[in-house]
Amino acid sequence: MGDLAALDLEETAFWRPLMRIMTALPRALEDQFLPETGLAITDYGVLVALSEAPDHLLRISALAATTGLSLSRISRVVDDLTRRGLVEKRRCAEDGRASNAVLTEAGFARLEAAYPGHLARVRASVFDHLSAEDIRTAGPVLARLAAALEATPPTDDCGGRR
């Protein structure tokens, strides 16, 4: 740690609220969402990704990349959504070892039903507190941070690359 410089005041003023947002926002969105819709925010994100994909179908690995979830996590979520009839799993025709996730009609209907409440919570939790200029300025900054995180290979629990 000797070579690492401490965060300066501006960095600290950015970092600490970001940490609070990363903790509080998912909780704020999920607290009413799960009881109202029967969907976790992660489930909703998977259904959205599939709804936007051609033929409502994505290879499991592409779905993991799209949602930012690990392969093991996306597999568990897809298996759960499959048990609930919201997603169907199909063997990939091009590669028999791989699987595709396909949004079912029931999954699309659940997504459509959940959307208005989710949108209202997103507006109340985030956008109602920002100006148009805040959104224009912050959007590219957050996109850059997300891209940098997605480009960084994950590490295992021991700090090694996976």
Image (cartoon, rainbow, N blue to C red):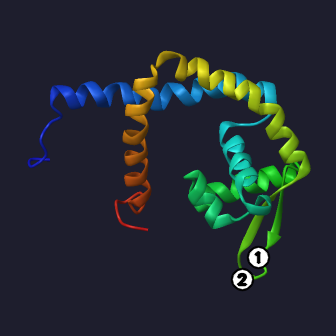
Badge 1 element:
loop
Give the image location of residue 138, x and y in percent: 39, 33
Q: Residue at x 81, y 64 (%)?
A: 89
* The quadrant where residue 154 appears: bottom left
The quarter holding residue 96 reads bottom right
Give how far across and how far down residue 36 sits, in percent: 79, 25
| Residue at 42%, 53% in the rendered image | 147
Query: SS for tag 2?
Result: loop
Asked whether, in this view, residue 31 is left or right of residue 130, the answer is: right
Q: What amino acid is found at the position of numbered circle 1 in the picture?
A: Cys
Q: Nearer the viewer, residue 127 or 83?
A: 127
Amino acid residing under circle 2: Asp
Establish if 16 lies above or below 109: above
Contact (Cβ within 8 Å) of mark 2 with mark 1: yes
Q: Position of residue 136 (x, y in %)?
A: 42, 32
Q: Disc 2 designates what residue?
A: 95
Q: Is residue 63 above or below residue 140?
A: below
Q: Residue furthest left?
A: 2
Left-right relation of 69 to 33? left
Q: Label 1: few (<14), some or many (≥20) within 10 Å?
A: some
Q: Is residue 32 above or below residue 19?
A: above
User: Dividing the picture into quarters, in which one does residue 113 lie?
Assistant: top right
Residue positioned 80% across, 50% down in the render? 81
Q: Which mark is on residue 26?
A: none
Q: Which mark is residue 92?
A: 1
Q: Nearer the viewer, residue 127 or 4?
A: 127
Q: Quadrant of the C terminus?
A: bottom left
For disc 2, the neighbor class at 10 Å (few under 14, some 14 to 19, many from 20) is: few
User: What x and y, as percent, mark residue 18?
Assistant: 38, 30
Distance of label 2 from label 1 (alpha carbons): 5 Å
